[in-house]
Amino acid sequence: MNIKRNIIFAPESRKKDGIPVTKNVPIRMRVIFASQRIEFTTGYRIDVEKWDTDKQRVRNGCTNKLKQSASEINAELLRQYTEIQNVFKEFEVQ
């Protein structure tokens, strides 16, 4: 059985005093399946202007406030994506 799902990475949308926060916001992973939505924190933060919305990754050559590189953050996002896919594949086999 194939479980239809969608996994999305995006900076969290926040407002402070009615103004969108764009600096040092958490990167969230949203998993959508069976008309349900679950959000996870990835453990990383980034400035919104350093985020590539189309690729759902940190732009190359950028770092966050903790000096974590784009390649380090993107590798961890890929690992988390793969882990979620593996969980779904396990349930598809059963």
Image (cartoon, rainbow, N blue to C red):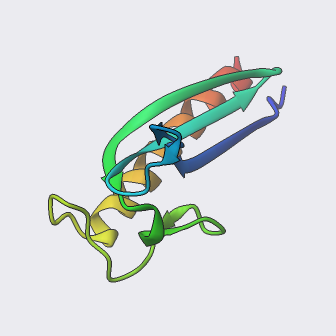
Going by the image, does 48 lie left or right of 64?
A: right
Q: Residue furthest left?
A: 66
Residue 81 appears in the picture as rendered: yes
- Residue at 73 percent across and 25 percent down: it is 92
Q: Residue furthest bottom?
A: 61
Q: Nearer the viewer, residue 52 or 79?
A: 52
**Position of residue 29 measured from the top left corner of the image (x, y, whole percent):** 52, 40
Residue 82 appears in the picture as rendered: no
**Position of residue 66 measured from the top left corner of the image (x, y, whole percent):** 15, 58
- Residue at 71 percent across and 31 percent down: it is 32
> Total number of numbered labels?
0
| Residue 72: quarter of image | bottom left
Give the quarter of the figure containing the C terminus. top right
**Position of residue 73 measured from the top left corner of the image (x, y, whole percent):** 33, 59
Going by the image, does 85 lie left or right of 3?
A: left
Q: Nearer the viewer, residue 26 or 35?
A: 26
Q: Nearer the viewer, residue 90 or 76?
A: 76
| Residue 50: quarter of image | bottom left
Give the quarter of the figure containing the N terminus. top right
Quick check: 10 above or below 71?
above
**Position of residue 9 measured from the top left corner of the image (x, y, whole percent):** 55, 49
Going by the image, does 3 lie left or right of 63?
A: right
- Residue at 71 percent across and 25 percent down: it is 93
